Image (cartoon, coloured by chain):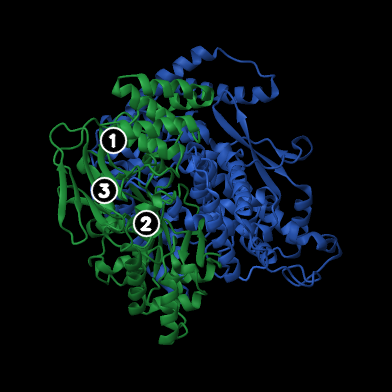
Chain colours: A green, B blue
Amino acid sequence: MDLSLNDLTFLFPEQLFLEFSSEDRDHLWQQVQKDQYSNDAARFNAYLNRISLNTFLTYLATASDVQEHPHLGIPDTELPSFWEMVNGTAIYWGQMRLILIPSQEPNLTELRVPREWVDIPNWAGNYYLAMQLNLEECWLRVGGYVTYQQLRNQGNYDRMDETYVVDAEDLIEGLSVMEVVEERFPSQKPTVKPLPQLSSVEAERLLEQLGQKTPYLPRLDLPFTKWAALLANPNWRRDLYHRRVNQSVKQPIKLSQWFQQIFDGGWQTIEDIIDTLAVPEANLAYRSGSRDRVMDVSATTPQAIPALVELLQTNPSKSTRLRVVDLLGDIAKGNPEAIAALTNFLDQASDQDSRRQAAVSLGKIDPSHAQAGIRRARIIDLGLRVSGHPVVLMVTLMPEPNYKMNVHLRLDPTGQTYLPPNLKLIVLDEEGNRFRQEESRQADNRIQIEFRCTSGDFFRVKVALGEASVTEDFVV
Amino acid sequence: MHDSQQIIKRFSTHIYLKDCNGVARLASIQDSNPILASLMQVLVEFDPEVGEEEWARYFLQVLRDPPKNYQVLSLGNRTTPIVSTYLIYFKILCNDLLFYYLQPTCLQAAVKISKTLQWSYNIHFHYPLEDCFIIASAESANPLKLFKNFDVNLSSPLNAYALISLKRIIKNRISQEIKSKSIKLSGYGLLRTVTKKELEAALTEVAIQPKTIELYCLAWQAFKDVFEAICPVTRSNGSRSKNPSTLTLTSEQLNQIAARYNQQLQRLHIKSKPVNGQDIEKKLKTCIHSVKDYQNRTVVSLDAPVDSTSNLLSHQIYDPLEEVIDVESEQELGHIREIILQAFAALDPLAKKTLMLWLGLGINQTDFLSVLNLQKQYQVTRQFQRYLKTILKAVVNSAYIQAYWRETTAETAIHQSSREHLAYLKDYLIGYCHNFFAQQLEKIVQEEISRDHKQILRQYLQEMNLRSRSRRNARFPSLNLQHLSEEFTQIKEILQNKFVDSVESQLQVNLVNYHSSDSSISNFIDKWLQANQAILY
């Protein structure tokens, strides 16, 4: 059994449960994709905070007794510079400053407040709210709150991740008590011990150090007092944010590194994409058999390779030969006979589809081969505009003579047969000029673009539907 | 002067629940611990002026700050040779005394949660009253932890604080266990979703030393730090580029985690050798196995209760659903009750009506959707929260509370006491609403049920009670239960129809619109009859 939202409200009648629509969720996802973050951890952190913030603000604006509307106290555009560094969002509600701390763990066992929200004088709040998100079922649970004083006096300080921790049992459930007490005793600004001053020289040194790209939030890379002193200054905080995101945002994906098996996050094999999405592979796969069957063949019949090679050389059917090419890529790793057969097929095949598939299979069984190709794909989520189903962008690289590279881009649907109409696949150059574009019609099951480029060329791929779009930058 | 026997009993009696088949209810059996009873006997003789609450606070104080010199033991600085026998064990005994003292509170918390759960059949089926009580008792075995944030300077009783905490603990434990069992995560997927509190508890369970636990937690933290880079979220619903449960970390990724771990070792000045990718993998695997074992453990079970044949004091069977809820701390709450009732009376008619039905008869919240013009059950919950907040506001604005607050400057104390007021007012309103309906039922039974019918009701209830005992003693004869049961059902139906008419006319509602009202009222009548057999004479 699992706990439904109803079960939870029965179990915790004093707590607050808020729902958000999947449309809102998808819209916020898009918004976070457009904002700049230096890494996936910061982006996901921003996403959790953004959903919590919007859902909670909507609730407060419509359902609370407090007359004044809640507000951020800073421009919305400042928020990414917080979420790049730390979990949590501050809002003002009446005289109260609330710190919202979202989490996505299935169990709300504790409230873990980053120390920044407690020990940086301008960041500290009056109340700290534990927010548990269920992204799949689209609800937010406000598990309870603690006051600043409680957090300082009764919270456990965890030096390992620089947080103050309160057990879920010690939170005050719901917001009724907070609202009622606040009415009688309006909050005062908490008195927080001042932080040591940083010289501008030291600040510059730290900004330089922390401005380097890391796969995680930078908050634990310095002793806390220095980190806090740096963050407490809004100019330094903004400076650090810009250094971190500018460094990473301008880094296009280096396609040459794909041949060294180095891939940026999110670029996966077709098989991994199928596993991730748990959808039938028919639309995505270049192969025509199921993966399980291919695995069976590889496990039981390495001796099948000569037969497959012979089939490749003699069978007149294009679809059969494509299937053989695909199978050899899966089962013939390092096999000279298969390598030779695929090389030969690649040289002799007249159609580009067959050549491309042969190059990719060759890349699988002999990655260092001069004609080895490679294929990777990424899930592109345009939200509900595509009926909630993401599309998949595949990039296939096939070396050509004279140091040229054949680039093939393909957009495939998932979970449905056809792409939505008017979905655009656009290729732009370094100046942003559009040089290729394809657009899906009423019943297109894929759209694709093929072009050649040379080493060092830059191009940008944009997938767009209406106002929603996702872009990826590449350098060959 | 306090009732010394009552105090001795409170600190030396523990409860266990026994299933009484045939009457579909539990009996709570009380066992006495002779060692604790004799200790309390000595203590109350020393200082008869000290009440239960003061003793409990004193034992907590000893646990928090054990006397350096055990010669100073009694509250009045008096010592005796008998007490000195226990000196060496005094801290342990204080722990036990508090555990025993909290037994009725554990039962009270379990009963309250169990009542809440009855509306969610799934959960109630998996977590009956016994399990709720076991969870609460296990937690109260460590009073120091339970009361870690209790402010001894607050005037609110220890019991009230414990009741709120224990209720929360039971609910959290249930929801955590259900979640853990329902989410089939393994491998790194499991590690990604676990909280540090769970991880530490899991590692402690497999007897890893505290110092070493820190290193495992650091490995886990390093893993979490780089996890988003390894397996980023790719969709708005939180799904990732790879399935974390089947994810295998490459040596490059493990080395990346190890580098982060080593970096943090330095920052934290932890004296431990730097690790490589293989070491990290081992540490993470240990974490995974520990968490898996921890989540698969069965519901906590207490040590076997005291030998019930030698130490059994009482075989008294009572209905915990009624009796325990009526236990109330002896405080001056009269005027607060008055304020609660005034504020309740001042609510708009719809608010009053719905709260009466919800709190008094236990009608399911989803049944209020149409009358409150709402779409979701959680919105009904929120609406009820708003009604209760209005009453809470009246309570905290009262002169009595304001006077108390003027004496305390601690913000935390104000929030804590308001939390307790909210819990109290809800309980009080439950009792008030329950009583409102009970009075109507009593009037109907007395005025509209014939003497013969009353006799049948009485016979049936007596027979059921006898059967519950004969299960244990196997010596009571049985009557023709089937025939009696049929007659009972018919009379109860008449009673229920009259009661429904009465409620509908009093509250101006149509109960047919409340789908759960039939079963709620049936339960209400059953419990009322069980507790009020004397009225049937």
* Residue at horizontal 40 percent and vertical 62 percent from the top: A87
Residue B528 location in percent, x, y? 46, 34
Q: Which residue is mark 3?
A: A26
- Binning the other alpha carbons within 10 Å of mark 1 as few (below 14), some (14 to 19) or many (20 upward) gives many
Task: Select label 3 or label 1 by which is in front.
Answer: 1
Q: Helix or strand or loop: what does disc 3 sit on?
A: helix
Q: Earlier in the sequence, mark 3 or mark 1?
A: 3
How many C-alpha atoms fall within 10 Å of the one at disc 3: few (<14), some, or many (≥20)? many
Viewer-closest of B19 and A121: A121
- Residue B159 lies left or right of residue B59; in this view the side is left
User: What amino acid is at disc 3?
Assistant: Asp
* Above or below A95: residue A443: above
Query: Numbered disc 3: what chain?
Result: A
Picture residue at 40% right of the left edge, 67% below the top: A85
How many tags in the picture? 3
Q: Residues within 10 Å of mark 2 (few under 14, many from 20)?
A: many
* Residue closest to the eye, B492 or B191: B191
Q: Could you tell me if residue A190 is visible in this image?
A: no
Q: Quadrant of the N terminus of chain B?
A: bottom right
What x and y, as percent, mark residue A210? 43, 72
Residue named by callout 1:
A414
Q: Which residue is mark 2?
A: B340
Distance from the alpha carbon under mark 3 to that under mark 1: 17 Å
The residue at the point 81 percent across, 63 percent down is: B87
Q: Is residue B48 above or below residue B34?
A: below
**Chain under disc 1:** A
Look at label 1 and name its amino acid.
Answer: Thr
Residue appearing at x 65%, y 39% in the figure: B16
Check the image and report above or below for B530 versus A16.
above
